[in-house]
Amino acid sequence: MSAILIAEDEPAIRRLLATILTRGGHEPAFAENGREALAIVERGGIAAVLLDLGLPDRDGLEILSAIRSRHDLPIIVVTARNDTAEKIAALDLGADDYVTKPFDGDELLARLRSALRRAGHAQQADMPMRFGPIVLDGARHEVTCRDAPVTLTPREFAVLQALVEAGGRVLTHAALLERVWGKAHVADVDYLRVVMRALRLKLERDPAQPALIRNEPGIGYRLAD
Ligand code: CA
């Protein structure tokens, strides 16, 4: 079994994370600083990393990009504050997800499971993709939701495709805007709001209480199962 690396300098939080991971059937491994974390990942046998961004020796985002530049494994960032800018930076540097302290153990395990699942199946390009009730066929430009065909505009389709490909991971506003509208529009968050409203009307059971397309305030969007 591969281990989940806990990169965290505070002993109490290390212990708490280890307890949560063990309860979820994972084997924990430990690093107290960034240098150690990088060395352990290099050694191999690590399935995913829970990375505290406030480590004593090196900037957390620097450690994140150092791991990401060499490895594909899921990285879930653990942030102390509800620091939106830091979360966005982490996601844009390739973090798979984030949790904010104090975190809920079950939520952490759910995020970890879904990150590991995504890492497990590399998408086959021509196959229809699924997420929850959505089936999206990129080759035919067709979408069904709860087995009913859904008609989308090209922008709506492109946004939904990005979200389905992310498989539950948060996509930042800038990442979605760049992908669908291009680099010149990375700040045009209103474009996204319009498309999300339309997608929710077409896909959600109750568009007033969206359960499928989730807003992460100030950060971006994700699909939820
Ligand atoms: Ca810390």
Image: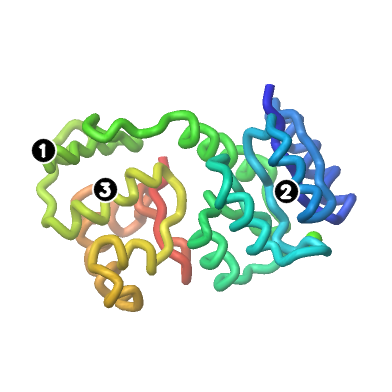
Residue identified by numbered label 1: 140
93 sits to left or right of 56 = left
Q: CA distance from mark 1 to mark 3?
A: 12 Å
**For ligand 1, which image quadrant applies?**
bottom right
Residue identified by numbered label 2: 38
Q: CA distance from mark 2 to mark 3?
A: 33 Å
Residue 214 position, x and y percent, is 40, 55
Residue identified by numbered label 3: 161
Among the two numbered marks 2 and 3 on one chain, the one whose residue lies closer to the N terminus: 2
Tell me the amino acid under the disc marked 2: Leu
Tell me the amino acid under the disc marked 1: Arg
The residue drawn where x is 56% and y is 73% is 85
Label 3 CA crowd tier, 10 Å (few <14, some 14–19, many 20+): many
10 sits to left or right of 67 = right
Secondary element under disc 1, as helix, strand or loop, is: loop
- Find residue 61 and report its image quarter: bottom right
Among the two numbered marks 1 and 2 on one chain, the one whose residue lies closer to the N terminus: 2
Residue 161 position, x and y percent, is 26, 48
- Find residue 171 and report its image quarter: bottom left
Q: Quadrant of the N terminus?
A: top right
Residue 53 position, x and y percent, is 70, 61
